[in-house]
Image (cartoon, rainbow, N blue to C red):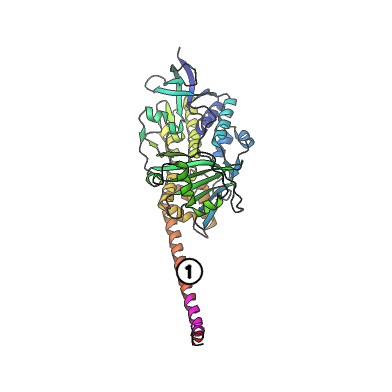
Amino acid sequence: MQEHHEIVVIGAGPAGAIAAALLQRRGHKVTIFERQRFPRFSIGESLLAHCLEFVEEAGMMDAVRAAGFQEKNGAAFACGDRYTDFDFRDKFSPGPGTTFQVLRSRFDQVLADEAARQGVQVHYEHEVVAADFDGAEPWLEVRDVRPGADATPRRISTRFVLDASGYGRVLARMLDLERPSKLPPRRAIFTHIEDRIDDPAFDRQKILISVHPEHEDVWFWTIPFSNGRCSLGVVGAEEKINAAGTDLMATLRHWVDGAPNLKRVLANAVWDTPANTIGGYSASVTSLHGRGWALLGNAAEFLDPVFSSGVTIAMHSSKLATECLDRQLRGETVDWEADFAAPLMLGVQCFRTYVQGWYEGSFRDVVFFENAQPQIRAMISSILAGYAWDERNPFVAEHERRLAMLAEVCRGLTSRRAAQAEAEAKAAAAANATTETPQLASAAAD
């Protein structure tokens, strides 16, 4: 006998758990099928402040706060002896100004458990192996992959499918939706360490993003947790990262040793967890929705880990999709392109501009610029805090043009100040030489 579930969500990660809870709270019956067994490891551990708006709306904030995650109030950037930081509380956009840095194994479990507590049916170790959207109702084939279980696929009909499968990209693969990302392929190598950081200047309430002083397209994340450990990773072009060797831990330590600020901060660290790697992670699709389905989070678009935008995009997509789906299931006609895809891509494209600007150098010039106007810093801080959909912010509404203009101004002022400092140094040296010459001549005569 064929099973029927009103709404099926593929994947129990943040996008799936938030979407399921939002729909369940609106009176719908939601079932999640998750291929893995929780808790499970995942990167994407530094949340942005905008995320908490969705956690709150999904009724999960109390549980998240009770979990004891490391509080986060901003992002710090370092390159050689240069250092700057952005406090998310000093931002242009309304909304939370603090968030958390989380062990994703624990965080994702908390969200999934909260969704289940609200009535969502969560089936772990169940894999979607086939899908069809051509009939009167969509149907899926789902296989129980638990040890010893009957692995015969079960056919399940449903009114709608939300794919929140993350890097698994279930429907993107099955429906041949994948297309190459416009971002060049990059690789990350990462691990968890007992950090033993005793540097008083190190702020555990901020992610530290360090730039390699000789290879500016190579950067590191350092994400402190509340348990004295941190997540550490290096990111760069695949050919550059791979060229350092095949031993992942040795490669990671090689790159860290080349960044003096990071080597100093982690001088006492215990490297006790094998390193892992992921590459070619940037992804895109030909469509975010279709008859009977929509794609959420990384199942549709993933850019780059540099600004921790992945979970934010995932949760924002869940919010938009559930609003559309709720209206549709109540009999309204919904324009998914206008009400879901276009609004979602506004923020995605904004993040993409700043990711590209980071690697090309324009956004790094902005980040490290000294004496920036407070109002402009607040607008940039808002984007770093995740508010990439707030079109009241000029650096969101016109992200490409505004970033280009700001970078040009920062570069020009920096060059003029450098030239002025050089001229002053030469003048001081010349004046010093003039006063010292008679003394040197007298000493030589003596």
Residue 375: x %, y % from top left? 53, 55
Camera-side residue of 254 and 331 = 254
Q: Residue at x 54, y 36 (%)?
A: 104
Name which residue type carries label 1.
Answer: Ala
Q: Residue at x 49, y 88 (%)?
A: 445
Above or below, 204 against 55 in this view is: below
Camera-side residue of 24 and 172 = 172
- Residue found farthest to the top: 1
Q: Main secondary structure of the magenta part?
A: helix
Is residue 432 rendered magenta in the image? yes
Residue 163: x %, y % from top left? 45, 29
Residue 361: x %, y % from top left? 42, 53
- Residue found farthest to the front: 446
* Pointer 1 local density, CA inside 10 Å: few below 14, some 14–19, many at least 20: few
Q: Quadrant of the N terminus?
A: top left
Is residue 305 rendered magenta in the image? no
Q: Secondary structure at mark 1?
A: helix
Above or below, 81 against 4 in this view is: below
Read off the residue under disc 1: 421
Above or below, 250 against 405 in this view is: above
Quarter holding residue 300: top left
Question: What span is in magenta?
Answer: 429-440
Camera-side residue of 422 and 444 = 444
